[in-house]
Image (cartoon, rainbow, N blue to C red):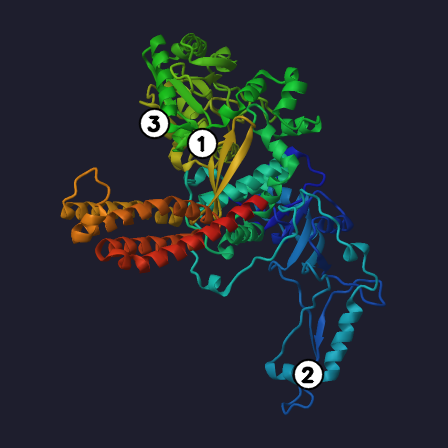
């Protein structure tokens, strides 16, 4: 059972990265925003160090024990209220007693304590929250960012007594408060230190969460119980969550933090992203965001910023930062992580040409292929193409043995419409058939010219007799999350000349642990991390996609029933048995979408903007088109013009039939039109249609351009133009030139307004 701990901020001082992460995983009430913390835990032992850590994190506090003006000893702050003096001049009978009231600070969020790490370790070891007083190094009251003046508690007696306080008593209190202030404020009180980038969640000063009166009137839904767990594998996270746009914005920030080597920031945002992605309701207020576990006031302020501006300031600034742009370019190379991207940048490389010219021989084979097919690997793979690739791989596997079965895992199984790569898990009920079979599958695909490059061919599982990965204690492991036989290949359809190269992973699993294999390859990154963390913390197991072992003695834990003669009838059933054996609720693959895949060609809604990234093959740079969220109204207005054209066709056809004129005569002659009213009406209807087609193209251009900046206004003006054109068409066709005047004037005014708005939009976009 999780301990009922207060909100805790963990200092990274004097802690190794592994120790820090291990402790973070054990704290259910962990916050990465020190401003929210009630308790700050650190591997420190002196009060001065505690004060320094708070100043470094830019959390200004007032010590609850204040020095008196002429006394070197610290005395407990107290407020003495003399009821007898306060009531002088009152008609009430004065009290013969003096009351001395001493107020003790309360842990209500306005104070913060810095405690030794030993308190947390001892509490975790004993399974209960120990008394905190023996471990407290410092206790202070949180001050406002602009004013660190001590705030004194006051005790109110009665309303009448407060009103009757004399002027002299007020002055006396003011003098007392003045004396209580430090005579010589430290340099840290006058000049704030620039915080360590890893000290808090944000690199910018924390802002107050903006709230409006209407926000307090909104009834907030209950936070679901599944959000109160620290394991994302215990809660559903859909592929398209209600707050998908905000999740995408936070993911952009997390990527920026990763590129800048802000490991603490990456973990903090990962926690917030996982929570927001699993929240089943559309966020409406900052207050609603702040109450979510792992979010708090900082994420609430970011949500308000995103809601108001349609973007996050940190993302906007990073997009114009040349260094971040270069790091993103390198980071998108297959086989290059954030550390390698920074290494490339430190070497002075600024584009792919520099990588090729100065560092080609130092690249791994995977990185060389990643550079060679940079643009193609950034293209997404549609679901139908992923299914086609999987079917071909299964076909060639069954040529080796007809008993092979296949599951397409990864993003495809989680329900994504487009995937970055294709992950195929193959298995056979006959364990001898999966031994080293990956070599034969790859060879047959290569012979069919379906594979152009084989980047990795691993036989780890076959080399240890297809047994689950052995348990080697708590020593760091370099095996990663997967030790199955697998091949990472580059795929290309030889039947299509324009077919792009695709990344394909072929994984082979014996049937006895196929449930672990499918589970290990079907979840988002955070989901998979939490499955391993859950197994370790809650079950004492070591989870790997090749199987599960007990950490105590290293024995294999069979959850799928194959050794008892009750083998699973299919791969999904085997996977369900793993969930059940671990005590986890079944989550369909579509509910495991805790990760956000980054790719070169993608559509991401960011607040009120939809960013469509298209990589230009000639220059290896992204072209960004920004579409407002309300742009759908603009498209509706544009679509309406197609039906107006249909109306013109109907009116013209009716007039032609009435006049008796046959195709292809475009207009009746002047002589005929003067004699025959029906011929005249036909000419009017025909001219009305021609006038519409002459103006429609320019109108649509102005509408689509102005809608980029003024979507709602442009759609409304476009609707006005459409109604004017309908009025114009009917009036002209039935009443002749005079019948078109009102519609003509209206459409002209709406059209001119749109063109001016389009000009303004174009200029502002050109100027940035």
Furthest toward the bottom, the residue is 91
Across and down, in percent, residue 472 comes to 58, 22
> Which residue matches tag 2?
165
- In depth, the one of 706 and 628 nearer the eye is 706
Question: Residues under labels 3 and 2: Cα distance?
Answer: 78 Å
- Image quadrant of residue 72? bottom right
Residue 637 is left or right of residue 97, and the answer is left
According to the picture, the residue beneath numbered tag 1 turns out to be: 523
For the residue carrying disc 1, how many other residues have a C-alpha within 10 Å: few (<14), some (14-19), or many (20+)?
Answer: many
CA gap between label 1 and label 3 equals 16 Å
Closer to us: mark 1 or mark 2?
1
Q: Earlier in the sequence, mark 1 or mark 3?
A: 1
Residue 519 % position (x, y): 43, 28
Visible residue check, residue 756: yes
Residue depicted at 25% across the width and 47% down the height: 686
Mark 3 in CB contact with mark 2 (< 8 angstroms)? no
Mark 3 = which residue?
573
């Amino acid at each position: 059972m999780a301990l009922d701990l207060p909100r805790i901020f963990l200092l990274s001082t004097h802690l190794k990265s592994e120790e820090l992460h291990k402790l973070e995983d054990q704290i259910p009430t962990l916050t990465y925003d020190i401003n929210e913390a009630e308790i700050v835990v650190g591997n420190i032992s002196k009060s001065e160090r505690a004060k320094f850590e708070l100043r470094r994190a830019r959390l200004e506090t007032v010590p609850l024990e204040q020095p008196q003006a002429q006394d070197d000893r610290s005395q407990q702050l107290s407020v003495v209220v003399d009821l007898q003096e306060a009531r002088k001049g009152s008609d009430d009978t004065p009290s013969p007693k003096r009351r001395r009231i001493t107020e003790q600070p309360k842990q209500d969020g306005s104070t913060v304590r810095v405690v030794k790490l030993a308190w947390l370790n001892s509490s975790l070891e004993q399974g209960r929250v120990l008394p905190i007083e023996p471990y407290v190094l410092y206790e202070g009251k949180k001050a406002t960012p602009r004013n660190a003046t001590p705030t004194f508690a006051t005790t109110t007696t009665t309303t009448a007594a407060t009103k009757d306080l004399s002027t002299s008593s007020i002055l006396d209190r003011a003098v007392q408060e003045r004396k209580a202030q430090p005579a010589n404020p430290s340099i840290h009180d006058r000049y704030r230190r620039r915080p360590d980038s890893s000290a808090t969640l944000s690199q910018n000063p924390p802002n107050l969460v903006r709230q409006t009166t209407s926000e307090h009137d909104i009834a907030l839904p209950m936070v679901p119980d599944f959000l109160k767990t620290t394991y994302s594998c215990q809660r559903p996270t859909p592929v398209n969550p209600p707050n998908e746009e905000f999740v995408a914005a936070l993911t952009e920030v997390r990527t920026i933090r990763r590129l800048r080597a802000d490991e603490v920031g990456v973990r903090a945002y990962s926690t917030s992203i996982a929570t927001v992605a699993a929240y089943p309701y559309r966020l409406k207020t900052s207050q609603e965001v702040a109450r979510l576990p792992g979010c708090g006031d900082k994420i609430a302020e970011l949500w308000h910023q995103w809601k108001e501006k349609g973007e996050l300031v940190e993302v906007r600034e990073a997009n114009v930062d040349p260094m971040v742009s270069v790091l993103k370019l390198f980071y998108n190379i297959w086989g290059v992580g954030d550390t390698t991207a920074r290494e490339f940048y430190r070497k002075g490389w600024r584009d792919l040409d520099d990588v090729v010219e100065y560092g080609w021989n130092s690249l791994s084979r995977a990185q060389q292929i990643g550079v060679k097919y940079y643009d193609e690997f950034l293209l997404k793979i549609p679901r139908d193409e992923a299914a086609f690739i999987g079917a071909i791989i299964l076909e060639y596997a069954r040529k080796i043995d007809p008993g092979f079965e296949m599951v397409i895992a990864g993003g495809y199984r989680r329900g994504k419409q487009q995937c970055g790569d294709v992950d195929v898990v193959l298995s056979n009920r006959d364990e001898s058939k999966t031994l080293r079979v990956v070599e034969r599958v790859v060879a047959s695909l290569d012979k069919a010219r379906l594979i152009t490059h084989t980047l990795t061919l691993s036989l780890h599982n076959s080399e240890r007799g297809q047994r689950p990965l052995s348990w080697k204690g708590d020593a760091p492991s370099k095996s990663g999350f997967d030790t199955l036989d697998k091949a990472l290949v580059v795929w290309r359809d030889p039947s299509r000349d324009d077919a792009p190269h695709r990344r394909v992973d072929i994984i082979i699993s014996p049937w006895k642990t196929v449930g672990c294999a499918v589970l290990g390859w079907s979840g988002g990154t955070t989901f998979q991390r939490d499955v391993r963390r859950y197994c370790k913390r809650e079950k004492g197991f070591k989870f790997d996609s090749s199987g599960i072992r007990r950490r105590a003695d290293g024995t294999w834990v069979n959850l799928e029933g194959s050794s008892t003669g009750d083998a699973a009838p299919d791969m999904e059933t085997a996977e369900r048995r793993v969930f059940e054996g671990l005590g986890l609720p079944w989550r369909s693959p579509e509910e495991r979408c805790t990760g956000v895949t980054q790719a070169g060609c993608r559509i991401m809604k960011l607040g009120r903007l939809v960013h469509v990234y298209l990589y230009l093959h000639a220059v290896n740079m992204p072209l960004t088109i920004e579409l407002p969220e309300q742009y759908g109204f603009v498209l509706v207005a544009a679509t309406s013009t197609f039906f107006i054209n249909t109306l013109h066709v109907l009116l013209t056809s009716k007039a032609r039939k009435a006049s008796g004129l046959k195709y292809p005569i475009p207009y009746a002659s002047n002589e005929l039109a003067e004699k025959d009213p029906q011929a005249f009406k036909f000419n009017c209807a025909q001219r009305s249609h021609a006038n519409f087609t002459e103006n429609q193209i320019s109108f649509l251009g102005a509408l689509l351009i102005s809608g980029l900046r003024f979507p709602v206004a442009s759609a409304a003006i476009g609707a006005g133009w459409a109604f004017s054109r309908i009025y114009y068409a009917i009036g002209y066709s039935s009443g002749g030139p005079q019948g078109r005047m009102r519609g003509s004037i209206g459409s002209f005014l709406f059209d001119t307004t749109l063109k001016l708005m389009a000009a303004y939009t174009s200029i502002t976009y050109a100027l940035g």
